[in-house]
Amino acid sequence: WVARTFAISDRFFSSTLGGTWSNRNVLYTGAPQRVRNTFDRVASDAPTIFEALTAAGVSWAVYLDGPGEPRQDSLGWNRGSVGLRPIEALYADLAAGTLPQVVFVDVTPGHEGDEHPPYDVQRAEAWSRRLYDAVVASPLWPCTAMFWTYDNHGGLYDHVPPPRACAPGPGEEAFTALGPRVPLLLISPWARRHHVSHAVAHHGSVLRFVELLHDLPAFGGRDANAEPLLDLFAFDCEPGLLVPPEAPAPGVGGC
């Protein structure tokens, strides 16, 4: 349904051959920050997109559906904790039209939106449906672009080998390949309808989109050279989804 209605990518890869934190680090800092296992955290002094947005006068927030994990404190959020908000504040801000300019919505492991085993995928679909409904009902919908993705592939087999990639920066020479593919959806009235992008992209592409949108410099080679996902949009005409369609009911395979 999403593919028929909005836009997706079939060449969106994890940024690293790794798990959650190395990929999230690329999303937030442009580099894995030399994280090579599940337990390491990014150095607390690593510059992040949150600090760059603050310096540029761009409002932002991270909405969490549960208590943040300790590792998240090392992503600069402890220096910008004013941007950390509970998930219910997201729905209030959407309804009021007071959402910040850049928003990350983070599903906390073990909570309602978690699709990891052994949690209930149908419950997570209901969580996703609630978020979609709130976004499209918001007065901000006409100027919204929501990227929906996952930080790693979950160990599932994929027949497409990850491509090579440039090193993110000094000390990151070991990270010269992308990881397995993960889903990427663009939900927006400006989405190129029924479009599948074949451009090679990764988590750093979302970061690059934010950098281009707000005229921010890249953090390093990985995000500077990332595909900015612009082919998912159709800016050459009036948005075609100002009145968005209703999503299928969750938990019945409609998504």
Image: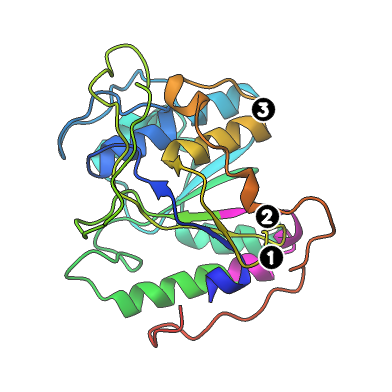
Q: Residue 18's spot in the image, x, y percent?
A: 22, 40
Instruction: Sort mark 3 into few (<14), some (14-19) or many (20+) by Cα contacts within 10 Å.
Output: few
Q: Residue 227's spot in the image, x, y percent?
A: 53, 37
Q: Residue 157's spot in the image, x, y percent?
A: 21, 59
Of 56 and 227, nearer the camera is 227
State left or right for residue 77 relative to residue 99. Answer: left
Residue type at tag 1: Ser
Residue at 45% x, 56% y is 10
Give SS at disc 2: loop
Residue at 68% x, 55% y is 144
Q: Which residue is mark 2?
A: 144
Is the residue 29 above or below the residue 137 in the image? above
The boundaries of the magenta stretch are 134-146
Spatial separation of the CA atoms under disc 2 and disc 3: 19 Å
Residue at 34% x, 77% y is 123
- Displayed quadrant of residue 69: top left
Q: Which residue is mark 1?
A: 138
Give SS at disc 3: loop
Q: Which residue is mark 3?
A: 57
Give SS at disc 1: loop
Spatial separation of the CA atoms under disc 3 and disc 1: 24 Å
State left or right for residue 165 relative to residue 50. Answer: left
Of 37 and 176, nearer the camera is 176
Q: How many marks?
A: 3
Spatial separation of the CA atoms under disc 1 and disc 2: 9 Å
Dots 1, 2 in contact, CB < 8 A: yes
Q: Which numbered disc, 2 or 3, marks the residue closer to the eye?
A: 2
